[in-house]
Image (tube, helix red, strand yellow):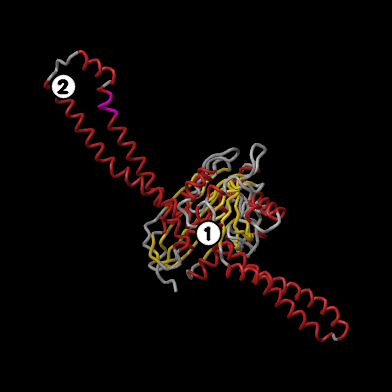
Amino acid sequence: MTPEQFLEFARVLPEPLLLVSSEGQLLATNQPVADMLGLRRQELRGRMLFEFVTEFANDVVKYLQACSSSRAMVIGSLTLRKNDGQTLICRSQGAVIQPWSPESSALILLRLENRALASSNFVLLNEKIDELAKEVQKRKQAEEALKKANQKLEIRVEERTTALQETLNELQLTQTKLIQAEKMSSLGQMVAGIAHEINNPVSFIYGNLYHAHKYTQDLLKLVQVYQQVFPNTPPEIQEQVEEIDLDFLFQDITRLFESMTVGTERIQEIVKSLRNFSRLDEAQLKQVNIHEGIDSTLMILKHRLQARDEYPEIKVIKKYSRLPNVTCYPGELNQVFMNILVNALDALEVSAVNGQPLEVNLRNTGNQTLTKNNPQIEIKTEVIDEKWITVSIVDNGLGINEQIHSKLFDPFFTTKAVGKGTGLGLYISYQIIVEKHNGQLSCFSVPGEGAEFVIKIPISSVS
């Protein structure tokens, strides 16, 4: 992304955003950042981030390097030095847009947030975690001392230590879930903003295509009438007719308008899918079309379905039944579809890289044989009865062994490389389906035979 492209979408967002290099140079900012500092945007470009923060340059560089080497969003804190001499503590969220390469340095997107209360809560939470960690250590030391003095107290100390450890784990999980929720909320807001900005000019173009086509046809009919009334045209006009190939123009102009109409309709479909996916921040129960949520998620992941480098194209087979509208939390349900589909894509990519021939049969596909050179994902929806529906997502990857299968929905459990997965995707998905929708989330897999995730939710009985 170039600074100009950054400004093109950042200017419509109300959040303070900066585009910086891994060395700390400000490449572009939007107006909210300039307002926070009390400066003009022109005064910021090309300067170094260190000039506007109170932190040491080495600390800022380390933070930027962490952002450029991580695929996840990196949380930090920056204290801004305003033009009037005052300071402003901001929560910073950094994500790499263009990874570092020998040809160019990394481009990092920083999102600033003036949330003194939120920052205070995060600081308090971290302090509490540190205190609990120290308390655990103290209890373990006390356990050894008390064991010699009084053997009867050993069980009580062990119980207390276990309780503190569980509390520490719960706080760490809460902290990570807060960061994850913030990331998903930011993604939803950005997607909704982009969809809104695209929709306005596309609607204008689409609305005028009909009239432009009609006017053009009227003019062409007028030309045909002239040809009929005055068949013997002067040489100058006949020469112009041959130069522009009028007969071909008559035939081709209709096809041109048809192709432009199809193109604008396709853009409108993409915008609709973006809006549907941006329900991530909705918190109310709504009646929605489940298929729209699945399709919008597939549209977001379309780039991963296409063939690239050593990965073949991944084919998606849709077997949609006729479903009624379902009362649910649409944004969170979209998040479940996203988590499961991303896991399926990761499994298929691992299968492709391993280069081992793999033949599996997808469940309920009529014994259709699939191989690793033909990776596929099948999505099937079905009405069980008047109260329940199911959504099954099946991949023909390497499958899941029994040892991993038993820990699949545990928090922080992941088989992915460091920085690629947090181990929260399936855990959060399980909570959304089971606790928020009173449904069921199951996984069926045999090593070498792919994996199938089955989502079962009530049609209207969510409490």
Q: Position of residue 116 (x, y in %)?
A: 58, 68
Residue occupying image coordinates x 82% and y 79% = 143
Where is mark 1, residue-wise?
184
Label 1 vs 2, first from the N-terminus: 1
Q: Which of 403 and 103 is in front in this view?
A: 103
- Name the residue at 53% across, 45% down: 304
Q: Which amino acid does label 2 sit on?
A: Gln
What element does badge 1 sit on? helix
Numbered badge on residue 227: 2
**Highlighted magenta segment, given as a residue range:** 248-252
Residue 7 in the image: state x and y as whole percent.
Answer: 50, 47
Quick check: can you spot residue 156?
yes
Q: Nearer the viewer, residue 34 or 443?
A: 34
447 to the left or right of 431: right
Magenta segment, principal secondary structure? Answer: helix
Q: In this view, does 91 lie above or below 355?
A: below
Q: Quadrant of the C terminus?
A: bottom left
Q: Does any portion of residue 365 appear in the rendered image? A: no
Give the image location of residue 195, x and y in percent.
42, 51
Q: What residue do we see at 58% from left, 65% from top?
A: 178
In the picture, which quadrant includes the N terminus?
top right
Is residue 102 shown left or right of residue 434?
right
Marks 1 and 2 sit apart, C-alpha to C-alpha, by 63 Å
Residue in view at x 65 percent, y 47 percent: 22
Picture quarter containing residue 77? bottom right
Q: Which amino acid does label 1 sit on?
A: Met
**Residue 86 numbered tag:** none
Tag 2's secondary structure?
helix
Q: Which of 36 and 100 is in front in this view?
A: 36
Residue at the extreme right of the image, as rendered: 148
Q: Please, is residue 462 above or below residue 63 in the view?
A: below
**Does the stretch in magenta take in 251?**
yes
